[in-house]
Image (cartoon, rainbow, N blue to C red):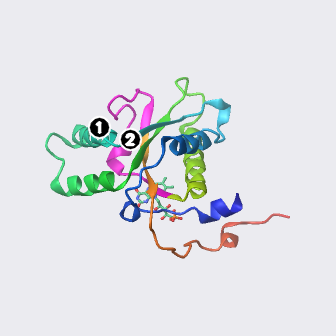
Amino acid sequence: MLSHIKNRRSVYTQFFTDKPVDKAIISALLDAANHAPNHKKTEPWRFRVYTGDGKKQLHQEVVSVFETLRGPDTWSEKLEKKFSGFFTKAPVVIAIFLHRDPAESLPEWEEVAAVGCAVENLWTSLDSYNLGGYWSSPTFLCDSYGQWPSAADNEKCLGLFYLGYHEAPELPRQRGDWEEKVTWIE
Ligand SMILES: Cc1cc2nc3c(=O)[nH]c(=O)nc-3n(C[C@H](O)[C@H](O)[C@H](O)COP(=O)(O)O)c2cc1C
């Protein structure tokens, strides 16, 4: 387990190969995500998984979210190039949602933290399948509840997780010293 945690890293779409990812593997990753800790058993993570032609729908949804926020015809060529590049390169794109407990029995931060735990479970599980990926959080996608087409009023997008097989070079781990972040009280 410790080795999976230490091997976890961001692998960006330019390193992905076009090898498809079996649905059974994606399912195992989502099952791992579903084991995340959460307060009051609200299980506030939701995922939409886009593969194959499904990514065309993702493209439409992302443009729609952007233009609802910024106005008609604001989706630029630059954005088009950027996002269609990501969606073409990644065989799997998972949209991550916070599904807020309708009773709001918890502060929002606890539910956001639980979604973060779920994504971390998925992310650390990639190592078992030689997959890579990363969490992308474009500001416009993570703006407000109910913003995503077909999302409920209590659902908010927290970003996209791109994943795929890859040929990324080994990179040095970039972390400061853990001891600088810890105070021992003994
Ligand atoms: C909540 C969250 C949002 C992130 N959003 C982005 C993003 O929008 N774009 C990006 O390139 N990386 C994003 N990342 C990935 C981080 O940049 C990456 O984890 C960090 O640079 C550390 O690198 P590592 O994952 O290889 O350890 C995000 C990570 C988290 C946890």
Q: Which residues are magenta?
A: 132-156
Tag shown at residue 57: 1
Residue annotated with mark 2: 50
Q: Where is residue 13, by image quadrant? A: bottom left
The amino acid type of the residue labelled 2 equals: Tyr
Residue 45 coordinates in the image, percent (x, y): 53, 37
Quarter of the image that includes the N terminus: bottom right
On the rendered structure, is 55 left or right of 170?
left
Callouts 2 and 1 close, C-beta under 8 Å: yes
Q: CA distance from mark 2 to mark 1?
A: 8 Å
Q: Please tell me which of labels 2 and 1 falls first in the chain.
A: 2
Residue 49 coordinates in the image, percent (x, y): 43, 39
| Residue, far top | 103
Q: Residue at x 51, y 31 (%)?
A: 100
Secondary element type, mark 1: helix
Please tell me which residue lies in front, 37 or 81: 81
The amino acid type of the residue labelled 1 equals: Gln
Q: Residue at x 33, y 56 (%)?
A: 89
Query: Does any atom of ligand 1 lie closer than 8 Å to the CB of label 1?
Result: no
| Residue, far right | 186
Residue 20 coordinates in the image, percent (x, y): 42, 50
